[in-house]
Image (cartoon, helix red, strand yellow):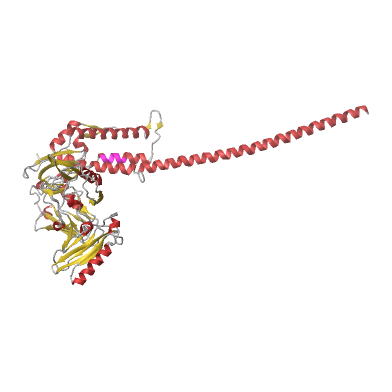
Amino acid sequence: EVAVAVATSDAELGAFNISVQQLARAQQISSDPNNVFTDPDEALGIEGTIQVNGNNVEIRDTDTLRDVANRISNASGTVAASVIEVDDGQFRLSVRSIQTGSDTFSLTDVSGNDVLQQLRLTQDASFDTLRHPITEGASSNEFNVRVLPVGDLLNLDTNVPRGTVTIANGGGSFNVDIDLSTQSLDDVAQAINDAAGLAGNSTTATVVEVEQGVFRLDIETGDGTDPVLTDSGNVLETLGFVQPSFLQVDQAGEDARFTVNGIQVVRSTNNVSDVIQGVTLSLISDDDPGATTTVSVIEAEGEAASSIQSFVEAFNSTRNFIRQRASYNTETQQAGILLGDSSVLSTDSALTGLLSRRISTLPSQFLNTLNDGAGVAAGSIQITDRSGKTATIDLTEAETIQDVIDRIGVADIGVEARINRAGTGLTLVDTSGGFGTLTVEEGGGGTVASELGILGSRQSSTLQGSSIADPEFLSLTEIGISLNLDGTLSFNQSEFQAALSDNFQAVEAFFRQEGGFADQASQATERLTDSTNGVLTIRAEGIEQSIENFNDSIESIQERIANEEVRLRRQFTALEQSVSQLQSQGDYLQSQLSQLSSNQRRG
């Protein structure tokens, strides 16, 4: 067994043959086995700065071997160092990467002292190699500023590298004095160019902006040869032109190299989750590069049936809700609160539409069964979209029509492949926005495009392929889901299991392929419930707006009633005052009449 696998619920179904040529390994180095340390707790008397994966580590003259190991381990979190007692009274410093892969850690002297050499980890400068070789030249590390001293950019306070370096090409060599405590990338480039000019050498140095705000220094020989760089005072090592050679490499960092169904894959780790959708591969052995482990990803039928049962129950719940609230009861002569509501009618129509869908199973059909059994030859096709962009698509490992669709979909062209309405072949749709010709040609002199029915060219955005298979469609009723008289669904699990046994690939395609039932159900639901443009969302917002308008109207009416009440109260008060005045006047008049009558009787 060379690998084990763990799959999630959305894993790609199928059989995958895995072979492992090389496991990923973490780099590990150690100090000179022929020159061991005798006391790990004695001050080393070494002082200077090193970089561990780009992080500065200050080594003090009072540090012991164990102190140095701790400082390296605490520098970046990606490198671990330890002191190993290899024999009585014999100790070595071990440095290892925590991560696997071919490019896992770097150790660099960035001070004038050769700290790594004194720690017995690296050889002298004569064994240095180019860290970033380019054609006829070498590049430095990348820096964020080109005009400030390099020592400042690296936060080097003391013992900043300086010295006279030698640069050679096929025409000879020349020396350059460089001081990183005062010179920037621009200054170093100028110094190299000045020295080369004086020596009559064709070598040039240029500061290149790799991307906005990121710079590097390139040295190019100009005569077709590779440069030979001789460091001094760790100047070139600090700039990143050269890297030290380790004295003892216990284990080289290596990438994992393996194949999946014959396709070569390289990853920096042995735990791989981006090759097979929904599957994590754990590579465990490379003892036999020819050995194969087959990973079979199949649908758990019980889980599939459970998922379908859940769908049926949710569908029926929605249908019952609509029936209860959007119907008219002839016995009670009462209408449901949602009777005639347009959004409810749209929902019911969408559900009904899903039930009548018949979906082509062509995507699941194997290529060797097409064209009346003649199949499709292995090979490649070449597609040019209407913008003029061309891609060669390797279909050697394609097994089904869906594989063909997927490979066209990920190609760097503006073309999509779809199943035609008849379910008998492919249709290519140009999405590039160009106005040229959509063309499909054979790749490498094969016959794949012709046998897929898509060989040819069109001035339009659509290329209709010819028929390559008999139409085969599935519907819900054919996999155990039936419609009841009341509009609800019933699920017969036995019929579903029988359909799976009869044609698993077709049932899988019915649900899972692009444009399949699950995709269409999702789109229908999205049209109803989209947070911005969904039918139900818009209707709910409309009802809420109506309620708000009604509340505003009620508030306005209440305000008018209150104002009317105030007006009537004022009138009533004024009327009471008038009545009171009239009463007073009547009383006064009555009094006067009584007095007049009394006076007349006395007279």
Per the picture, the main secondary structure of the magenta-coloured stretch is helix
Residue at (6% x, 43% y) in the render: 288
Where the N terminus falls, by quadrant? top left
Q: Nearer the viewer, residue 14 or 421?
A: 14
* Residue 68 shown in magenta: no
Residue at (35% x, 40% y) in the render: 345
Q: Is residue 113 above or below residue 289?
A: below
Where the C terminus falls, by quadrant? top right
Q: Count the marks: how many?
A: 0
Q: Nearer the viewer, residue 189 or 410?
A: 189
The stretch of residues the image draws in magenta is: 349-354
Residue 148 drawn at (x, y percent): 31, 60
Q: Nearer the viewer, residue 22 or 469?
A: 22
Dividing the picture into quadrants, the one containing residue 208 is bottom left
Residue 217 drawn at (x, y percent): 23, 62
Residue at (10% x, 49% y) in the render: 371
On the question of residue 475 being in view, the answer is yes
On the question of residue 78 being in view, the answer is no
Q: Is residue 307 above or below residue 229?
A: above
Residue 164 drawn at (x, y percent): 21, 63
Q: Is residue 219 above or below residue 276?
A: below
Q: Nearer the viewer, residue 211 or 295?
A: 211
Q: Is residue 310 left or right of residue 262?
A: right
Q: Is residue 124 left or right of residue 554?
A: left
Residue 232 drawn at (x, y percent): 19, 60
Dividing the picture into quadrants, the one containing residue 132 is bottom left
